Image: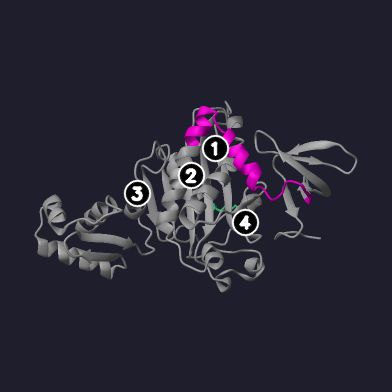
Amino acid sequence: MKKEKILDLLRGAPEGAVSGEHISAELGITRAAVWKAVDALRRDGYKIEAQAGSGYRLVSSPDVLTAHEVSSLLGKTRIVGQKIDCLASVDSTNTYLKRAAHDGAPDGMAVIAAQQTAGRGRRGRTFQSKDGGLYLSVLLRPKCPPESLLPLTGLAAVAVCDAVESVCGARPQIKWTNDLLLDGKKLCGILTELSMEGESGALEYAVLGIGINVSQTRDDFEDEVRDIATSLSLHLGQSVSRAALAAAVLREVDALYTALCAGDTARYLAAYRRGCVTIGREVRLLWRDERESVFAEDIDESFGLIVRRPDGTRETIRSGEVSVRGLYGYAE
Ligand code: BTN
């Protein structure tokens, strides 16, 4: 508790330092107790400089994923992340949150895990979820018809690109619909699941699940994805704090939720179009159990993919899979 409060004070003064005297007055403890707690934080992996005359300064934090760590980095949001469950391991953060939603979990609740034992991907696939990744789901209870959530996954793709860029300086590209890539390899997958009331068809809730490869090495990936997956540390050559990344993702999801509810998503669509590697290429489309080669022309207002067939006819695809030549997953 003492350590957490000291961390909050240090984070509240990111530029400058906080004097031992100030910490001792705020927490009602002696200067010796402050020194002891700072020493304990250092042993936990926090780098804290002591500057003569000005006090303590937080230089860097270890990669610990706790609800307190994420909340203190997150700061104030409108809805998302006001309740956070953080777990060392879970079957699937989406499944966990769906269970919580049925028990009345609040709008914006987030669950974060360091690993998943039954991570789920689109089309019933499994999602490799070893420790080293960041697995996160957010519960949304918007008061709107289910069809207005069509753009949610596209908005989330842009939100995660923004979060990764703000924390790491590198911006992923988007492969329609919702894979994020670095160096042409998969960095992140997004799975959105909706629950609707049987009789009325009204939306009960949506669970937005995001899996980002953070510190995996090549050997951490199993054979079938080793050559087509990457992680932030593989790309950057340095480690990334999962708590800082989780906080950035939650902040961006909060902003997208506000934009979605206000119908104010033009910025996201423009960013999606700019960052989408699928547009302007010949792609292989798997749709309604058929494979065909088409030209990917554009993204429509609901983040559907507008394709042109060789005979000139156009169609908007909302739920298929595309393979882009030169990028992972292109099957001959
Ligand atoms: C895909 O690429 O097919 C989507 C993968 C989505 C993975 C995330 S990880 C967090 C959340 N929990 C899950 O079980 N799946 C999503």
Q: Residue at x 22, y 53 (%)?
A: 5
Identify residue type, mark 2. Answer: Lys
Q: Nearer the viewer, mark 4 or mark 3?
A: 4
**Residue 236 visible in rendering:** yes
Q: Residue at x 66, y 33 (%)?
A: 301
Q: Which residue is mark 2?
A: 98
The picture quadrant where one finds residue 37 is: bottom left
What segment carries the magenta color?
257-284
Q: Specify whether 327 is left or right of 219.
A: right
Q: Please rate how many residues cluster around mark 4, counting C-alpha atoms within 10 Å: few if below 14, some from 14 to 19, many from 20.
A: many
Percent position of residue 306, x then y: 75, 39
Q: Please rate how many residues cluster around mark 3, counting C-alpha atoms within 10 Å: few if below 14, some from 14 to 19, many from 20.
A: many
Considering only order in the chain, which callout, 1 or 3, is on the residue closer to the N terminus?
3
Q: Which residue is mark 4?
A: 181
Q: Residue at x 42, y 60 (%)?
A: 241
Identify residue type, mark 4. Answer: Leu
Identify residue type, mark 1. Answer: Ser
Instruction: Assign the N terminus to one quadrant of the image.
Output: bottom left
Identify residue type, mark 3. Answer: Ser
Name the residue furthest front: 53
Q: Nearer the viewer, mark 1 or mark 4?
A: 4
